[in-house]
Every structure is written in structure tokens, then in C-alpha cells.
Amino acid sequence: MEKLIELDNLGIIFYENKFYTISGSNNSGKTTLIRILKNKYNFVQGVIPFELRISNDNLMDELIYQKVDKELIDYILKELKIKSISKELISKLSKREIILVQIALALSKKPKVLLLDNISNYLNDEEFKRIIKFLRKYQNKYNLTVVNTTIHLEESLLTDYLYILYNGEVVLEGDTLEVLQNDNILNKMGLDVPFMVDLSVKLRDYDLISNIELDQDRMVDILWK
Amino acid sequence: MEINNNKLVFNIKDNKINGIITDNKEVIVNLLKKEDRVSVIKEDFEYNYFDNTIYEYMNSEIERKNLVLKDKYKKINDSLKIVGLSKIDINRNIITLSESEKKLVQIAIALLSNPDIIVFEEPFIKLDLKNQKRIIMFFGRIKEKFNKTIIFITNDSNILYKYADYILIIKKDKVILEGTKIILENVESLNKNKIKVPEIVEFTYKAKSKYNVKIDYHNDIRDIIKDIYKHV
């Protein structure tokens, strides 16, 4: 696997074609990190909500202006379900629509790494999951590393690897489920452990189960069947 | 207190933390705004183009709302102190504020007019656990001490199950369910109306309905663990 980014001072490495979450409490340094990465590497595109620099007033004109090939435009617009708004004035779009437009613009530049900074604040749960699912599909097709920052650890369950920042430093890292089992440390840092992980870890402490179980139905079966 | 616009009527409990789950936040917020002595804390921090510092920003809000304050400078400082920002430099540029500081400044602004009702849109969406707890303690305190009525407008049933005293579910201009947090234990009705069931409730409901386990609904995960331990 190719290393795309290595930040020695932080101990962060991003490999190709992987899905990362960076989480941490308020003021832990997530957005600062995203800004640094976005400015430092030309193969990185970042979606920071509502920070949008474009030369046209609608998405379609901008994509044509940037000479994005038609097939890619069609694919991205269809998958993000924003074909119908692609010719509308960006200034007239809703917040969630602007986020989707920003993702489309970022992908159209064919980055190796896509950064998403707290975008779930502006999308509902289902829509956020749909976008992540699409990016997984896109990843297989075009080879892309995605880095999602969030305060909500629940989102990390959709990704492969998790970094936890605290005061601008990485304090925990590893495969998502491994990291999430540090419930006490995460709580102390002001983070809420996803309910099913929290329940699993605590039931395991009582020797009632042996593994982490994320599915509620299966958990109920394990305990009472 | 009754809120009524001919089409929609609902009751807010005074001096409580009310939670509203709705499919049309805008209508509800606008309706509440018509009441006397109400302050709304919006989901997003809205920058004013000409204001650079916290002081300038709060000052513009005072002018925008036509508030008449005796000692403006003192009032701004007091308000920041109440929300726990006593050490903040009011000459700091607002773009340097973190998400949690922005929320606290918004609350400080809402308090300037000494409102009876505080409407808070998506109160916790950008806040970590520590800041959530800080804010909920703060609202608990002002509710008791100064008889304020708090209204959280959010679709996050997990949050309301944890923190709200009284909950209303309003869909298509109609109150579907209302009551204490017990209404969020009415899983069938929530499912029917496509309202997200709090996760802790959903798990308990599954255990009860599938295996007839005699565990109770709890707010805290540690309590549910104790209950499970007794019943496996």
C-alpha cells in the first residue's frame, strides 16, 4: 500500500484507498489539521462547509469551465443526486445542497485524498450514510483515500481507521473498533462512545458477552436466546 | 403556555426544558418568535460582515434587537460571565472562536434581553460531551433560579430522552405525541411516525418484546447493564 501522506510530528499516516476518521473534542485541532493538509498537498481536496471558491454561479458551468470530462460529471451528479440543482444559482441552494455541491467539485478534480470536515452537521443521518456509501463505491472505482473529521464517534463505525486528537496531538489510533473500546479515555476527552460499542464493552466487563456486537437484534439474541 | 396560530395549537411547560421534534423547524421557530420576551439561539453562528471583535458583534446584536441597556459594556461582560466565558477577551476577533465558544457567545447574546423563553435550535450538534453537559447544567440552573422556559428544537431523540422534562412531537402541523420522556418509550408509535427511537430505548424494547425480558427503560447505560445482569 502506498503512503500518500506522512505527518511525522503528529504520527499520522494516510495510505492509499483507505477510509479514515479523525475525531476529538471541541478545540482538539481537527479543522486546523484539515486546513494544513488542504494547503500542503496538491493531490488533496477538502470540503470545509461553505468555504467555496469558484468562478461561476452554478455547479454545471463551473464543472464545464474546469473542463471536467462529461462521463465523470454525469457519474458524480447522479450518485450525489444533485443533477436537478446543478444549474441553479449556488447562492440560492440550501446548506445541505451546498455541501453536496462542494463534494462534487472536490471529486471532479480527481484528488487522491478527499477531506471532509464535519459535514454531517449539515446532513441528516440517512443522507450522510448514503454519501459515505457512495464514496466507498467511488473509492473502488477511482482509488481514493477519504478522511472524515467529526465530533460524533458513531460516524467512525463507517470507516476503517480512527485517529483521536486531543490538544493538537494524536492520543489514540488504530482500527476503528479497537480504538472505540477505550470507553473511559474517550469519555474523559469529552467524546460519546457509540451506544452499541459502549454496551458491548460494559457487558464484556461483566463476562456476559465475549465480543463487540454492533447489531441490536443479534445482541438481544446472544443474551437471551 | 399555549402557542396558537389557528392552524396549530400546542402547550409549552413553563420553567421546564421542553423538547420539540418536528418535520418543520422553521414554522415552529417562527411561531415561537411571536411570543413576548423570547430569544432564539440559531443552529448556526451568523457572522455580521462589519464586526470583527466579540464586543462589536454583541453590540450590533443589541442594536439589531433595539435593546435599551443601561450599562451596555457591563451587561455584555455579565452575560459572558454567566455562560462561563468570564476570561474571554472581548476584543478578540470572532473568527478565532471555536465551535463551543461560538455557541456560548450565542447564548450570552440571547440572555442580553433577559428573555422568559429561550428557544435553542439543534443545541448540541457541534458540541462534545463536556460542552453538552456544561450547557445542560447551565440551562438547568437558569430554569430553576430565574424561572426560564427552555425549548430545544431537535430531531435527536437520544438527546431529548436524556435531557428534556417535557417532549412534543409535531408533524404536519399536528401534535402527534406529547408528555414526559415516557413518550419516547412508545416505540410502535414512534416507528409508525418515522421518528427515530432513542438507541437505549430501542434495545430495551427489543429485549422486552422478543424474549419477554423484565428489564426497565433506563436513561443511563450503567443502569441497563445492572438490569441485564439480573435478568440473563
Image: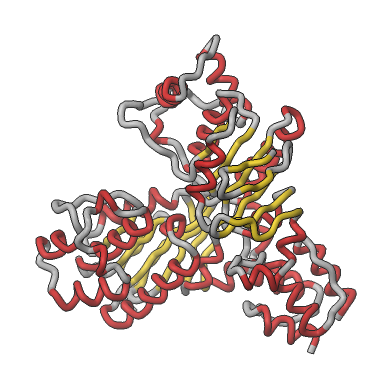
- Residue A151 at x, y percent in the picture: 52, 56
| Residue at 38% in and 58% down | A96
Q: Nearer the viewer, residue B180 or A121?
A: B180
From the viewer's perspective, is residue A183 above or below residue B141?
Answer: below
Q: For the view shown, which residue lies furthest in the front direction?
A: B6
| Residue at 63% in and 72% down | B191
Report the number of discs.
0
- Residue B134 at x, y percent in the picture: 65, 41
Which image quadrant: the C terminus of chain A? bottom right
Name the image quarter holding residue B224.
bottom right
Q: Is residue A197 visible?
A: no
- Residue B35 at x, y percent in the picture: 58, 33
| Residue at 58% in and 72% down | A178
Name the image quarter holding residue A62.
bottom left
Q: For the view shown, which residue lies furthest in the top direction?
A: B70
Name the image quarter holding residue A206.
bottom right
Q: Nearer the viewer, residue A186 or B115?
A: B115
Q: Is residue B158 visible?
A: yes
Q: Is residue A22 left or right of residue B224?
A: left
Q: Is residue B68 left or right of residue A114?
A: right
- Residue A104 at x, y percent in the picture: 26, 65
| Residue at 55% in and 30% down | B110
Q: Nearer the viewer, residue B219 or A85?
A: A85
